[in-house]
């Protein structure tokens, strides 16, 4: 099931996110800090295709922030909010190699990556739009990974029993595949 930016906001604010977002959007735009201005990006497709400059604004000083993408329309000289979404600025640093990217448009993408141990991972990179050329297949970066939970529920408490021999075996296998960066 694909998630949209509305799902991100709903994860934070619940079902009444539209009203809360409408109240916050002016602050995102008026108080956001310029992430990077990227000249001319194609927006729309087909006969309506245009190239317009846009800017990305980052709002907030806490780990949870908002990124607002604004296209600057040269014809009517208006700044138009194209999207705004929450993201977590501080996460777990992980070295990843980009193997592919899936783009729905020119300022958002899902990156497919692998860890140093070869474990595949796909994620939406919230700052992709501020420098899309840097996110090419074969590039290696340290990404800060964090997530918002769309659905979270407590699991039933259970008593688990396991023979010591099985436990040692599973622990040994897990240690062989453990990323050393994740060990605190």
Image (spheres, grey):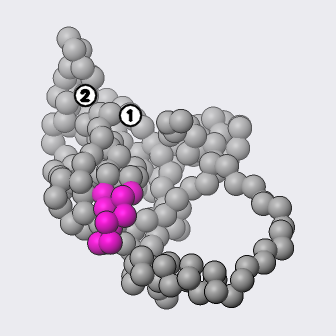
The residue sitting at 48% across, 79% down in the picture is: 173
Q: Secondary structure at mark 1?
A: strand
The residue sitting at 20% across, 19% down in the picture is: 49
Where residue 82 appears, x then y in whole percent? 38, 34
Does residue 70 appear in this view? Answer: yes
Count the marks: how many? 2
* Location of residue 20 with respect to 45 vertically, above or below: below
Res. 103 mark: none
Q: Secondary structure at mark 2?
A: strand
**Disc 2: which residue:** 43
Task: Choose between 165 and 129: the one closer to the eye.
Answer: 165
Q: Is residue 151 magenta?
A: no
Where residue 154 appears, x then y in whole percent? 78, 60
Whole-angstrom CA distance, mark 2 to mark 1, is 10 Å
Where residue 44 appears, x then y in whole percent? 27, 23
- Is 71 left or right of 145, judged from the image as shown? left
Mark 2 and mark 1 in contact? Answer it, CB < 8 Å: yes
- Is 159 left or right of 46, judged from the image as shown? right
Does residue 126 appear in this view? Answer: no
Q: Locate residue 143: give its quadrant.
A: bottom left
Res. 82 mark: 1
Q: Which residues are magenta?
A: 113-121
């Amino acid at each position: 099931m694909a998630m949209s930016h509305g799902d991100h906001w709903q994860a934070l604010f619940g079902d009444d996110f539209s009203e809360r977002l409408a109240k916050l959007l002016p602050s995102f735009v008026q108080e956001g800090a310029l992430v990077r201005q990227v000249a001319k990006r194609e927006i729309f497709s087909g006969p309506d295709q245009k190239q317009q400059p846009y800017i990305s604004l980052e709002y907030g000083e806490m780990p949870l922030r908002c990124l607002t993408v604004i296209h600057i329309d040269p014809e009517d000289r208006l700044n138009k909010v194209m999207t705004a979404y929450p993201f977590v600025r501080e996460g777990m640093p992980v070295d990843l190699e980009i193997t592919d990217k899936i783009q729905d448009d020119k300022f958002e993408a899902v990156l497919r990556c692998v860890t140093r141990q070869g474990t595949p991972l796909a994620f939406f990179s919230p700052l992709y739009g501020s420098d899309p050329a840097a996110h090419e297949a074969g590039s290696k970066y340290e990404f800060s990974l964090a997530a918002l939970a769309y659905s979270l529920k407590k699991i039933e408490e259970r008593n688990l029993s396991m023979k010591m021999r099985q436990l040692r075996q599973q622990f040994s296998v897990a240690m062989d595949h453990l990323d050393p960066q994740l060990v605190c």
